[in-house]
Every structure is written in structure tokens, then in C-alpha cells.
Image (spheres, rainbow, N blue to C red):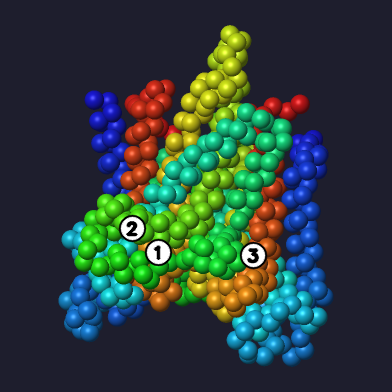
Amino acid sequence: MELRSYIIRRLLLLIPVLFGVTLLIFGITMMFSPVERAALFVTSSRQMSDITAIIETYGLDQPFFVQYGTWIGQVFSGNLGWSKVVGMPVWDAIWAFLPATLELAIFATPIIIFMGIFLGTKAAAHKDRPLDHGTRVMAIFGWSLPTFWLGLILLMVFYGYFTGLLPPHRLSIQMDMVVNSASFIRYTHINTIDAILNLNGAVLLDALRHLVLPVITLSVTQVAFIMRLMRSSMLESLGKGYILTARAKGLAERVVVNKHARRNALIPVITVAGYVLAGMANGVVITETIFTYKGIGWWAWQSAVRLDIASVLGFALFNSVLFVLVNLVVDILYTRVDPRVRLGGTLQ
Amino acid sequence: MTDWKFMARQLVKNPLSLAGIIIITIFVVLAIFAPLIAPIPEGHRDPYMIPRDGYSATPQLPSEEHIFGTTEGQYDIFYGVIWGTRTAFHVGLVVIGVVLAVGIVLGSLAGYFGGVIDEVIMRITDIFLAFPALILAMAIVAALGPSLRSVMMALIVVSWPSYARLIRGDILQVREEDYIEASRGIGASNFRVIIRHALPNAIYPTLIMASLDIGAVVLSAAALSFLGLGAPEGSADWGQLTSFARNWIVGPPGNPLKYWYVVTIPGLFMLFFVLGWNLLGDAFRDILDPRLARR
């Protein structure tokens, strides 16, 4: 019951934050002329040609809070405006592009988590020895790499030097035709999963080939981030009394490190899941842009470059709501994982 | 100031932070002596725009005249990366400077006075922190119109909340100390207490860590410029220079790496710049970590 009241309290606290988020987003829109803002209310291409009527209908020359009220009403009814870049409502565009990005995330997330935790544990267990120095230098390098530049280098080598080995885009032209043909059922629009469900090995292989470089590009910084965190968390954990006890009773070092120390060291790492998601959201825009991988990040970039404000802000709003919700889930999970966290107190 | 001596000794002793110091020093030298290293051609007006040598669309290989070659549109890469060092320092110093100023003012107000002021300022930071930073920055740049100025403003808007929070936390820690009580007791004004007593005792670690964020700021700015939202085409900016590479990743058949210099050189400058700051930051994190005792 304690948990339920905690969740309710956290959900209530979300309301002012999300109110502020929408206010901020709308504040940014108000820097535009009424004509440009009209795109926020349009839901079809037919309406697009009748801008003056829209300005009148939605009162785009009214005071700030009146306009905010109109806009937020539209947002709640699922209208985020019109995306000029792809010629469909923003909300539809988000759903159309999301599966591609989800596919990237499905592959990148386990790599980030397992590589980060594995390397961090190894570094801490070998503190101040060559393995530790090596992984640390690697982490600082990974952390300092300009992601967009890494993507270009990878393409130069694996697409240029090894001609066409790991190409950009989501699928090759032939496989794209297969996927869009009538005999191929698109259950999820996630190519690899659809290929498995359709028992089509050629599409699966092609999709994987196109995923390798973007997934690497997206993961490197995050692996470095988790690794660094895991290392310091492990070091703290290894200094605790129960580790001394475990060693004193003659347990193998492997057992001490992997069981006693790592389990406790994982707790703080869980709390940064939200930051990893934010890092991926940032990274997705850059990664998808470099590889012309048409997901939600690519669409956001296209929209930003063409100053398609309704799309950019719809994208930002979508991301912030996602980010806030993930952080909420993480905090709730945290109370489950770590029994020391008392629900009554402030969770800071 | 044994603290500073201790810190300096630790930094020089550690090969990683020493490497960081050397790298940053080299970049400072490059920035200061840019006009000597890459002279501005006669009659060229804006030194932060890269001079062009013709208008041919194909990048030219490194030669005696252009030691790092040219990009499409014949922008000299060497000139671009050298003067780009100045752009990087400019962006990093201005953004971190403004963000720290805002963070110190709002953070100490929130931490020192607490109550409603604290609540209001912290709820505002919550709103900004509810966005993935680069995405909010992208939206702001799109709204302000793409330019390096917009990029800097956007980065300031998205970064101040975390610094305000850190400084608030620092102030909270010292607020109840005896010397704060004492100075209030002898009638010092709130302003004086904050400026003379609370801040100097609270914020040095935050200040140091913040100044080392220059690398991260420059990286974000470069990313936005690369995406075509920052510095205009032809400016001496590493991110912008890298965006020229997008069309030249693959060379002609038989020579796939022909345009390697367009792709790699600006990125290497960026990598080493950021690496320098991060090496230093990593060492400081260890030095300032209270859990790792001094020996």
C-alpha cells in the first residue's frame, strides 16, 4: 500500500512538470508569426492552403494564454499539427517513424548495458593495473568522440574501403521492394522482427547488415558512460565490510566480485537508465542523419533544417513526456531493487 | 593554499591529466597564434570565414598550398581547423561563463533562502531537465533561426538548470555552518553573507568541474553545426567543416579512401580538443572524490 501512495504522489508531481513543459514548448512557438504557427493546428493538406481561415478559427492573434488554451486542447485531442516534411499529421509521422528508431534501440540497449557493466566491473576488479588503465582510456576516448564524426569514419571504412559491406539506409533497394510487396506482412514495421515472422532470411540478413554501423555509433558514448559509472560504483562496493568478510571466509575472488560486489554496485547504475534514454534520444538524431536511416531522429532533423516548427516541437514534446515517464518507472523500480530506500521519505 | 598545491601535484603526477594539460595548452597556443599559423589572405574581410580558392565542387588533395587539402567549394581545411580553434574556445567560454553566472545567482538564491524561492526555482529547473538536452536545443535553434549565436543561446538555455542545482546543493551544505550564523549575527547583509562567506566555501569543486565541461559544450555545438543548424557554410567551425564530408565519404572506384582528409581532419581536431578537457576532468573527479582518501 505504501508503494501505491508513492506512485500516486509521483504521478501528481508530474502534472506541474508537464504543464511547464507544454508552456515552454508553446513559448518557443510564439516566437513565430501567426502564419507559421497555423501549421500547429492543421490536420490535412487541404487545410494547409487555407491559412488565413485557420488563423481566424484558432485565434492566432489572441493573447498568449488564450492561445495556449486552444493549443493544449488540440494537443489533448491528439492534434500536434501538420508535418510539412512528410505531408502528414505530426502524430501520424511520429508513429510512422518510431518503429525504425525502436529497432535501433532494441539492438543498442543490450549492448550498452552489458558492455558497460562488464567493462566497468573488469576495470574496478583490476584497479590501477594495466587492464584498468586501458579500459579507462578507452572510456575517455569514447566519451570524447564526436558521434557524427565516428559515423562518417565507420562509413568511410566499411562502406567505402570494404565496398558496400555495411551500407547506410535501412534496407537495400531490392529488399525494400520485398518488404513492401503484398506477400510480406508488416506486423511491427520493425524489419528484423517482421523478417523472422515472415521466415524471410534474406530480409533479415539485409536488415542486420544495415543496423551494424548505426548501432555501434549510437552505443559508443553510452557504453563509456555506463562503464565509468559502474567502475566507480564497483570500487565503492569493493571497499565495504561484507567484501572483506567474503574474502576472509575464503571465497574465490571471482565469486566475491561477481556476486557480492557487483550486485550491490548495480543499484546506482539502474538509476541512470533515464539518462541513457536521453542520451540515446540525442544520439538517434545524429546517427539516423548520418546513415540516412529513416527513423524519428532523421525526420526531426529534416524538420529542423526546413524550419518545420510543428514537427520539431511535436518531437520535443514526445521526447520529454517519454523521458519523464521513464524516470518515473526507474524511481519506482528503484524502491523494489533497493530495500534500503524507504518510501515515506524524500527520495533524493 | 595547500589544497591547490596538492591538486596541482596530483595533476602533474598522473600521466592522463598531464596529457590533458598538454593538449589544452597546444590548443590555446593554436588559438592565440592563429593569424600567424594560418595568415588571413590579403583583402579577406571576415577571418572567421574560410577563404576560398576557386569554386570547383571537388575537394582538392593536400598540396603545398593547402596542406590539409580543400573541401568542396574550395574552402581551405587547414585555415578552417586553425581558426576553428578560436571558434571552439569562443563557444565554450561564453556558454560556460553565462551558464555559471546564471547558475550561481539562481542556485545561491534557492539554496540560501530556501522556502518559496527555492521551490519556484527548482520547479523551473525540473521543466528544462525534462527534455533530452540536444533535442530542446535543436527546437530552440530552429525557432531562433540557424546561426552560431542561436546555438550558443540554445546551449545556455538547456545547460543552466543542472548548474543551478549543483550550486544550490553546495550552498545547502554550508548554510547551517557556524561561520554563516556568526556573520549573520554581527549584522552582515544576506548579500554579503552569500558573496563573502557561503559561495567561497561552497562552490570551488563545482566551478572546476563546470569549467571542464567546455569540451562537452563544444561537442554539442559542433553537433548542431554539423546538422546544419549552427555556423553558416564556410565558417571556420569544426562541426560545419565536418558536414562537408557527408558527400565525400566514398571516393571513386579503385580509390575509395581518396577524400580521407575531408572526413578525418576536422574531426581529429574536435576529438583531441574534447579529449584534453575530459582527461583533465576525469583526473579532477578522482581528486575531488571524498571517498578516495588522501595519502
Does the CB distance between marks 1 and 2 fall below 8 Å? yes
Q: Which residue is mark 1?
A: A170
**Occupied quadrant, residue A200:** bottom left
Q: Nearer the viewer, residue B82 or A177?
A: A177
Q: Earlier in the sequence, mark 1 or mark 2?
A: 1
| Residue at image coords 64%, 74% | B255
Which quadrant of the rendered structure holds the C terminus of chain B? top right
Residue in the picture at 36% in, 70% down: A174
Residue under circle 2?
A191
Instruction: Please state which of the two labelled residues, at mark 3 or mark 2, is closer to the viewer.
Output: 2
* Residue, disc 3: B267
Q: Residues within 10 Å of mark 2 (few under 14, many from 20)?
A: many
Q: Which label sits on residue B178?
A: none
A8 with respect to B127 (left or right):
left
- Whether residue B260 appears in this view of the structure is yes
Q: Callout 1: 10 Å neighbours few (<14), some, many (20+)?
A: many
Identity, as a three-letter code, of the amino acid under mark 2: Asn
In whole angstroms, how far apart are the C-alphas of marks 3 and 2? 32 Å
Question: Which residue lies at the image location 18% right of the left edge and 61% below the top edge?
Answer: A77
* Left or right: where B81 falls relative to A250: right
SS assignment at label 3: helix
Q: Residue at x 60, y 20 (%)?
A: A253
- Determine the secondary structure under disc 1: loop
Q: Chain of mark 1?
A: A
Q: Amino acid at mark 3?
A: Gly
x%, y% of residue A315? Answer: 35, 62
Of B152 and B198, the residue lying toward us:
B152
In the figure, A241 relative to A209: above or below? above
Quadrant where the N terminus of chain B is found in the figure = top right
Position of A262 relative to B184 (above/below) = above
